[in-house]
Image (cartoon, rainbow, N blue to C red):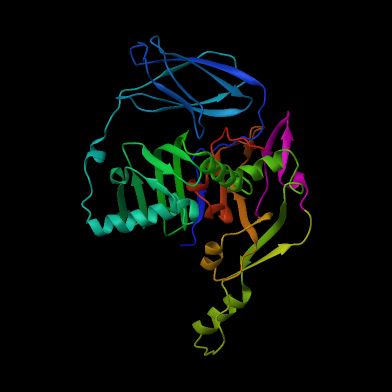
Amino acid sequence: MNLKQIFLSLFLFSQIVFSQNIIKGKVIDENSKPISGASIYVDNSTINTKTNSNGEFKLDLPNGQYNLIAKANLFENFILGINATDKKNHTITLEPEVISLQETVVQAMSKEDWLYYYKVFLKLFLGENEAASKSKIENSKDLRFKYDKQTKELTASSRKPLLITNKYLGYKIEYDLIDFNVNYKTNYALTLGTALFTELKASASQQKKWKKNRLKSYLGSVNHFMKSIYYNRLDEDGYDVKRLIRKDNPDYIKYKENLAFGGITNEKVPPKIITYLINQKVPYDSLKIVKNNQQYLNFKGLYSIEYKKEKEDLEYAKQNGSSLIGNQLSIFALKDEEFLKIEENGTYYHPGNLIVEGYFSYEKIANMVPMDYKIETD
């Protein structure tokens, strides 16, 4: 499946430590009673705490925009978008958990069909590389799949958080799957969810391997790329960005017209689409705009991204019909030509407005490092 990937998973990364901010708040129920022991965490990070007996919590956060997740047993999860520099106290009201009638009806599915859809899910959720092979969903049986033959859409859901053990990067991940959708008509795959990371314990030698793998996963990732744009470091960080043109092939149109009018040809069928690069350096003002010290990706069309400091995996090359490996090549675009705000801590909003293809979509959740990951030096 050559699916264009939309990872709405609120994957937010940070490498540089900025000034700290104390975030305070309180979690209550619909009757304004405090909820003690509620989990509070920053999405896609190791940063977490619990509310005290008065339902109060506080967190130390660097500057930037974050999604704060509040969850407690028998309540629906709550996602609060915050800016760390906002000093107000946050009050979070959790609603009682509701299970809709539709969710209680489990679609009849054979074991074989479930296994087939689970393999598709693993490929698009964890990936297909070494990191994915060393990652395991511990409670995979909680997943439910539904395939709509009319719309040709595959969806997945789970009432319980997916518990993922990643022995490639050394993390335990609690992932609340909000949405997973594969549309075979439009050729798009979408993943939406929130994640809490916990570091695994291991020997010093294993920790050293994890440290190396985390750095490899971070460098060349979408989030590393975003930080390079934000700080105008594309060249220094190893990125070569070029304008990419993709359009209908006039030779293919002529070929179809010839066949439609009864023509006979022994020619090789031309490709439907032709793609080529504009071999010119792309200035930063073609990618982003700056307003009131805020930065936004703002462009039309497609851009090719070559990451020159790391080669692609051999398995990825084989999938693309090559036995030779080259630099990591990706394509990115903005959905519906929307703006995409990028923050100093590497976050970007709204993630759904970013569409990636190529190597960016090859490395998936199994290669994700948490938002508070920092490059470690020996």
Q: Is residue 294 magenta?
A: yes
Q: Magenta stretch?
A: 282-303
Name the one closer to the observer, 138 or 266. 138
Which one is in front, 348 or 183?
348
Up/down of 237 relative to 346, above or below: below
Q: Residue at x 61, y 18 (%)?
A: 21
Q: Quadrant of residue 347?
A: top right
In the rendered structure, the answer to whether residue 143 lies left or right of residue 311 reads left
Residue 339: image quadrant is top right
Tell me if residue 375 comes above or below residue 219 in the rendering. above
**121 on left or right of 357:** left
Q: Please state the horizontal and vertical placement of residue 86, each as a whole percent of the image.
A: 60, 18
Q: Position of residue 136 (x, y in %)?
A: 39, 47
Residue 68 located within the stretch drawn in magenta: no
Closer to the camera in the image, 28 or 132: 132
Q: Quadrant of residue 338?
A: top right
Q: Is residue 149 visible?
A: no
**Residue at position x 36%, y 56% from top?**
119
**Left or right side of 334 for 106:** left
- So how many labels did they put on this image? 0
Position of residue 155 measured from the top left corner of the image (x, y, whole percent): 36, 49
Q: Nearer the viewer, residue 236 or 295?
A: 236
Q: Is residue 360 above or below residue 292?
A: below
Q: Is residue 30 visible?
A: yes
Quarter placement of the N terminus: bottom left
Q: Residue at x 49, y 32 (%)?
A: 43
Query: Residue 53's spot in the image, x, y percent?
Result: 38, 10
